[in-house]
Image (cartoon, coloured by chain):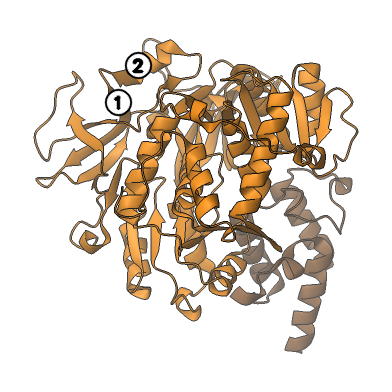
Chain colours: A brown, B orange
Amino acid sequence: MSFEKTLRSFILQNFLFTDDDSALSNSDSFLERGIIDSTGILELITFIEEQIGITVEDEEMVPENLDSIDNLVRFIGSKQSKDH
Amino acid sequence: MTAASSHARFASLVRYLEHTAERLPRREAVIFKQRRVSYEELWSWACSIAAYLRRQGIEPGDRVAILMENSPEYIAAYYGALMASAVAVGLNTATKSRDIVNWLNHSQARWLFADGRHAELPLIAEKIGRGLRLVTHAEPGKPLEEMERTDWAEVLQESGEKIDLSTLDDPERLASIIYTSGTTGEPKGVVLSHGNLVANIESILEYLRLKESDSIVNVLPFYYSYGNSVLHTHIAAGGCLILENSLVYPHKVMQKIVEEKATGFSGVPSTFALLMSRTKLTDYNLSAMRYMTQAGGPMPPANVQRLTEELPHIQFFVMYGQTEACARLTYLPPERLKEKLGSAGTAIPGVEIEIRDEAGNPVPVGTKGEIWARGENIMKGYWRNPEMTQEVLRDGWLKTGDLARIDEERYIYIIGRNSDMIKVGAHRISPKEVEEVIAELEAVEEVAAVGVADEMLGQVVKAVVIRKKGAQLESKAIQRHCLNNLAQYKIPKYIEFAESLPKTASGKVKRHLL
């Protein structure tokens, strides 16, 4: 599974409690839609670090990196390309 | 005159804003996103709102509800309502329409000032209809035809005619209702007078030594008593409120503190736990910061120790209170923090504290009992609920429901609480709020909700569910139903299915066994 699909499935299952793929679009802001709160973001980061194997630095915890599937995919992609 | 603020004690909250706006018209009152609003502007907005409400025929004591996140508009609507002799009712923006409609009906609010983009507004409009006039800041996503609506910009065009403020100078006049829970049967609205709030403001100004040079990065919602108290004390002191409405990105909050050279920061235990878990506080230049305050439940002493060791120049105030006391009852002076670690402090100026047994008699030093409190800050009662009021207000004393012991120097140590309330971060949740939503599901025979320990939030909700015989129901379906009907923090993190609930002989659920 691509990490986009992995992330989508994680958000849908854990924050929206559904399998319905249409419940979330890739550009939806987690903050604006009230999908993720202050502890939810920590769960998301733990998930990314454990499942995708990257480390999220404290200063990287900004909406530009984490506030939507699109932002996450871009952020993780850039982290992975830096590591290689 | 008070030592900290050098002003006369006023009889109305409105006088504090007036006084600050006259004294410091250009001082920044609020910083929110890219906007900086001065006291002069804030005062002018409040005057326009009051003029609008008066022209619309508002009567003294009418309720004006506010459904806005922390913003300059929230503050203007609140003070504008007070200036029009109304009672301001700040509503929890994080919750769903069922709670909001419940509170609007219970408070019999005649006006609602709302963020037009609030996701629940169309449902509220549908359920409430024309009984309520709506003023929206920001264009609604949907037309909201069911309600009579005025635009915020139109309201601000009202000339703030000179309103005779002397009619407001009555400390007994009701100022605010703060709802602390939202079950359908018994919403709990704490009624506070101007005199109540003024007494608490003056005490807090005195022990925090708040001055016009102070500025706070505020993450606490104004619709709860802690945030409400931060708001009013800063207006009274002429300080600046820098609003950050989310803790999702702790780094951003810390950056804001640095950029704005904030002198203060207030939080509940989970606020500090979140900041410390994802930021290294010593990496930030916090040299301007003078103090931090913590209330909203006991903070683990290890976290207090770590924080004060990492930031030794910052005075750390541990505090305790209740919405029923406007906010504050006790504080622990920072210079005594080390020797009294684990204590919630001693009574603030103007408040008396006693620890009493079940019969209402004071207990000896060191003995466990219930905290009773007396002072001008104690609420008038629960809105439209004399029975519930009688349960907690006795001979001028507030029976808090919190259990504690007191030492020889009258410092209290909180041990627990005499109630089933669940405390998730800054939120108080009645188990009934969760139970009545889950019980709506066809497959549910019975349900009980309890709080279980959580390292970050203090507690999270667990629901124990008994399914009807042969019925199929999974955890996710229950959580999804909760997501659609409850604020996010009320959604059970854990769901357990059981065959039966442990009960007393009289049929009451033994929650401590769940």
Horizontal side of B377 relative to B469 (left or right) equals left
Residue A4, placed above or below residue B354: below
Horizontal side of B204 relative to B372 (left or right) equals right
Q: Quadrant of residue B487?
A: top right
Q: Amino acid at mark 2?
A: Glu
Q: Quadrant of residue B505?
A: top left
Residue marked by disc 2 = B391
- Residue at x-position 56% and y-position 61%: B27
What chain does badge 1 belong to?
A: B
- Callout 2–callout 1 Cβ contact below 8 Å: yes
Q: Amino acid at mark 1?
A: Lys
- Residue at x-position 53% and y-position 32%: B165
In front here: B304 or B216? B216
**Tag of residue B399:** 1
Horizontal side of B239 relative to B196 (left or right) equals right
Report if residue B274 is visible in the image: yes
* Residue B190 picture location, percent across and down: 47, 26
In front here: B293 or B367? B293
